[in-house]
Amino acid sequence: MARRRSTDTKPASIKDVAALAGVSVPTVSRYLNDRGVSDEKRTRIARAIDMLGYRPNPIAQALVNERTSMIAVMCADITLFGQAQTYKGIEQRAHGGGYSPDVFVLGGRDVAHEVRSCLDRNPAGLILMNFDPECADVLDLVPHDLPTAVIAGNRDERFAQISLAEDDGGYRITRHLLELGHRSVQYIGIPGGVGSYSRMAGWQRACREAGIVAPDPIACTWRPQDARAIGRRLADDPAVTAVFAGNDETAMGVIRGLRDGGRRVPDDVSVVGFDDHPLASIWDPAITTIRQDFHRAGAAAFDAVTGIIADLGEGRVDSRTQLVEVPGELVIRQSSGPAAR
Amino acid sequence: MARRRSTDTKPASIKDVAALAGVSVPTVSRYLNDRGVSDEKRTRIARAIDMLGYRPNPIAQALVNERTSMIAVMCADITLFGQAQTYKGIEQRAHGGGYSPDVFVLGGRDVAHEVRSCLDRNPAGLILMNFDPECADVLDLVPHDLPTAVIAGNRDERFAQISLAEDDGGYRITRHLLELGHRSVQYIGIPGGVGSYSRMAGWQRACREAGIVAPDPIACTWRPQDARAIGRRLADDPAVTAVFAGNDETAMGVIRGLRDGGRRVPDDVSVVGFDDHPLASIWDPAITTIRQDFHRAGAAAFDAVTGIIADLGEGRVDSRTQLVEVPGELVIRQSSGPAAR
């Protein structure tokens, strides 16, 4: 009994079953759904199903559709400004198209377990926001053939990647401070912001180029209160005249702490941030920063993944490891000024 | 030919098919996956499948599992502080349990279309963050039997609801200002914050009780810059000595605008906010606010939905329309002070 399915490229449809059994499509459907069909027709349908190798595909199809429409978006913490904005960029780009993003928050959990839960859902592609250390581990856990785009982090040649050119941003904002006459720039790091493509690496490069020994970076948490405590400590050190905070919220905390300690910003100490948080421009003083285009990075990642999916459909593979740059923009406001004489 | 499935409660399993056909389970599996099985065995398996009314359930099962493990979380904008925090509360509560939350962002789109897309995914339950006007429309679009919990918004007796008791919070923070001697309190509203359970309703009630005619509320967007422009305008009105801003970010903008216009906070004008944003305590001056426990609200909503699912499984329905209160807490800081003489 030759099964058509093994020779034809197209699997047998419910229509084929109905035609071979000499019954209507609704009758086959009733049979498949265990509803009343005469014994005689049931025998004919069962035989047709067997001969054609037919499988009740509405269910399988639903799963297949599921598989091809979901783009998994992984990040460490969706409540952080940059990650929320990036997700919004992905969401807006996806809107109305054939793919819908689904967010998976790692949040300091067992990464391997979270990745498995995600893959169990059969995503058509993956966007990884590689802003936090645990996220980098994800890349060793995803199958090689899953269309993937990585946002930020160090360059990983195995994947398509959207770079925010943070090292360049860190370099430019440090240069800005040095050009104002500051002889040293203190860096306050946010969690995970290390590696050669980080804002910290740009700071180090600018210091090196200027022949300055970069002071040890100070590590901070995501909590603005902790940044405030650091600002209070820095207020006691008269050598500190310029601070580059790893993000704007950290800058806000540092400014408050410096003020607690009796230092004026920018008159005594310049403080700059990174990201251009919506509150950075209304802070007092308004914060000099690098405006990062998280929206555009999210949209670019979505385009990259759906591009890879389309390319694979046409047998091309060129897009899999592309690099797209979405560089930030230096925005000079009131929190940075000339070094005090 | 009597089909076992129509009389038994339990559908036939692959084991039943293997036993009846006199083959091993892996052989049935190979048959179902179109891999090499001898013609003779195939005929026996096909007959057993037909007699038992067996349906290749691994696929169906996957769909069924999908249906019962996903809790849809709908909100208007996941990048806003309250919504992001609420999602985090849901996420953390769900972690490690049998249900996983999936966020659906309405974002000013065709709500009916978004709800359909969500329902197509067969969620086991729904959590709706009812902070924005478009969200209320969702409730008329979800099936009556879908386990649902609503966070915030006006009381809807059809559903389980987590109230943040915003009206109570609005009342208390307005009372705080009136007790400081202010004769009037200006309210600046955030988008959608209307209705009898809103912070604005609490402000109106406190004014009414104090025998004060509440001034017309001023509508603001989510953009802190717009709040700053409102602050600048208010700076020109010497009658304004106390402002209740609809959330902390709005309060920050208003404070900055008042300062632009030469007014000191709180010496000339007291400004209070709502939510207890992480930056509220490090703002200068630190902002008096109502601390909302979004995390707890999210966790309570998750508990409510999974409770309804469990209750339905046991034939109970009591939990479907429960009301849980997660009231806020008045946090007095430096942005509010006695009315100037």
Image (cartoon, coloured by chain):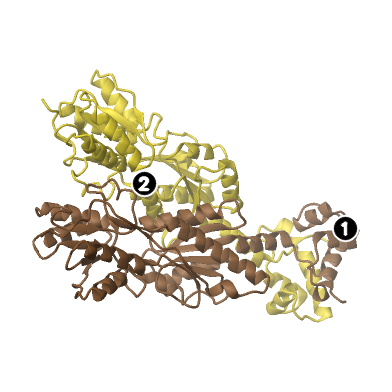
Chain colours: A yellow, B brown
Q: Quadrant of residue B9?
A: bottom right
The reply to whether residue A317 is in sight is yes
Q: Nearer the viewer, residue B257 or B289?
A: B289
The quarter of the rendered structure image containing the N terminus of chain A is bottom right
User: Considering only vertical position in the picture, is B321 above or below B104?
Assistant: below
The quarter of the rendered structure image containing the C terminus of chain A is top left
Residue type highlighted by circle 2: Gly
Q: Nearer the viewer, mark 1 or mark 2?
A: 2
Q: Quadrant of residue A121?
A: bottom right
Residue at numbered disc 2: A82
User: Considering only vertical position in the picture, is A164 above or below B37?
Assistant: above
Tell me if mark 1 has few (under 14), some (14-19) or many (20+) residues whose alpha carbon lies within 10 angstroms of its own: some
Q: Nearer the viewer, residue A180 or B293?
A: B293
Label ID, residue B41:
1
Residue type highlighted by circle 1: Lys
Left or right for B149, reference B124: left
Q: Residue furthest right?
A: B22
Q: Are marks 1 and 2 in contact (CB under 8 Å)?
A: no
Q: Residue at x 73, y 56 (%)?
A: A6
Q: Position of residue B45 (x, y in %)?
A: 85, 62
Indicate the chain on which mark 1 is placed: B
Do marks 1 and 2 share a subunit? no
Label ID, residue B84:
none
Q: Position of residue A16 (x, y in %)?
A: 70, 70
Indicate the chain on which mark 2 is placed: A
Q: Nearer the viewer, residue A140 or B69?
A: B69
Q: Residue at x 37, y 72 (%)?
A: B197
